[in-house]
Image (spheres, rainbow, N blue to C red):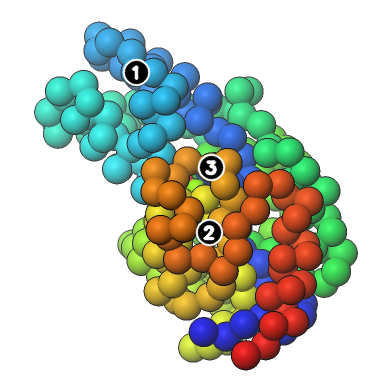
Amino acid sequence: MNVCLAPCPVVFDLDGTLIDSAPDIHACVNAVLREFHVPPLSLDQVRGFIGGGVEILWRKIGMATGTEPAGQRDMLASFMTRYHAATSLTRLFPNVEETLGILADRGHSLGICTNKPLHPTEAILDHFGIRNLFGQIIGGDSLPEKKPDPAPLRAALTGLGAHPEAPRAIYVGDSEFDAACAAAVPVPFMIYSHGYRHTPIDQLPHHAAFDDFTALPSLVEAASASVG
Ligand SMILES: O=C(O)COP(=O)(O)O
Ligand SMILES: [Mg+2]
């Protein structure tokens, strides 16, 4: 694995990393379930289903509610018509905006690699006025493959000018999908501990863990300095 020489690209996951979007996704899911006369799910249930993209989300909802695959497809279609407008309950995690600004000011190019579809991804970045910070945005439907496949992260990195075979870069995320994706590229993975993962952090491959975004710039610079 190439450790990063300063200033390298830093690519971020979105749901559970930069934004706490579970309340909006939960509200959107329950609006769809109401439309289809299915009892609602709790916030904890829906939060636990986020990370693999909308198809996996609705497969898990289907299993939890006893909905057949055909019904799941109809519900997913209804969900997609609402998803891009689901912004009012979403918050940036604390200190995200300041940290992105610090990294950009230090010369790091920034990107997004998320399993969230591109349209709602761009909508939420616009909602917070931070879309322009990112030189490359790869959504869950930008390529045929999704994380944990390395292709979306590779696409984000090459879009930011990293070497396609040996990218010097850092990936920042919150989930099992992100850890496996970064390991497959491979690039150092930094995990935000307040996200939506199920697995204990020490059981996931990672270069560093952090629970406050103010810690990230020095972790990035330390990774930059620790050239193997
Ligand atoms: O939409 C999802 O399920 C997850 O999105 P993420 O990749 O930004 O965590
Ligand atoms: Mg995530």
Asked whether mark 3 lies closer than 8 Å to ligand 2, one says yes
Asked whether mark 2 lies closer than 8 Å to ligand 1, one says yes
Position of residue 82 measured from the top left corner of the image (x, y, whole percent) = 46, 26
Q: Nearer the viewer, mark 2 or mark 3?
A: 3
The residue sitting at 57% across, 47% down in the picture is 193
Find the distance from the CA under tag 2 to the CA under tag 3: 15 Å
Find the distance from the CA under tag 2 to the CA under tag 1: 28 Å
Q: Secondary structure at mark 2?
A: strand
Residue that numbered label 3 is attached to: 195
Question: Going by the image, does 100 lie left or right of 50?
Answer: right
Give the residue type that dot 1 points to. Answer: Leu
Q: Nearer the viewer, mark 3 or mark 1?
A: 3
**First in sequence: mark 3 or mark 1?**
1
**First in sequence: mark 2 or mark 3?**
2
Within 10 Å of disc 2 (Cα), the crowding (few <14, some 14-19, many 20+) is many
Q: Nearer the viewer, mark 2 or mark 1?
A: 1
Residue that numbered label 1 is attached to: 41
Q: For residue 183, what is the image quadrant?
A: bottom left
The residue sitting at 72% across, 79% down in the picture is 224
Vertical placement of 183 versus 116: above or below?
below
Position of residue 71 measured from the top left corner of the image (x, y, whole percent) = 18, 26
The residue sitting at 39% across, 28% down in the picture is 46
Front residue of 178 and 123: 178
Front residue of 32 and 47: 47
Give the residue type that dot 2 points to. Answer: Cys
Q: Is residue 137 visible in this depiction of the protein?
A: no
Position of residue 201 measured from the top left corner of the image (x, y, whole percent) = 48, 53
Front residue of 111 and 212: 212
Residue that numbered label 2 is attached to: 113
Q: Are marks 2 and 1 in contact (CB under 8 Å)?
A: no
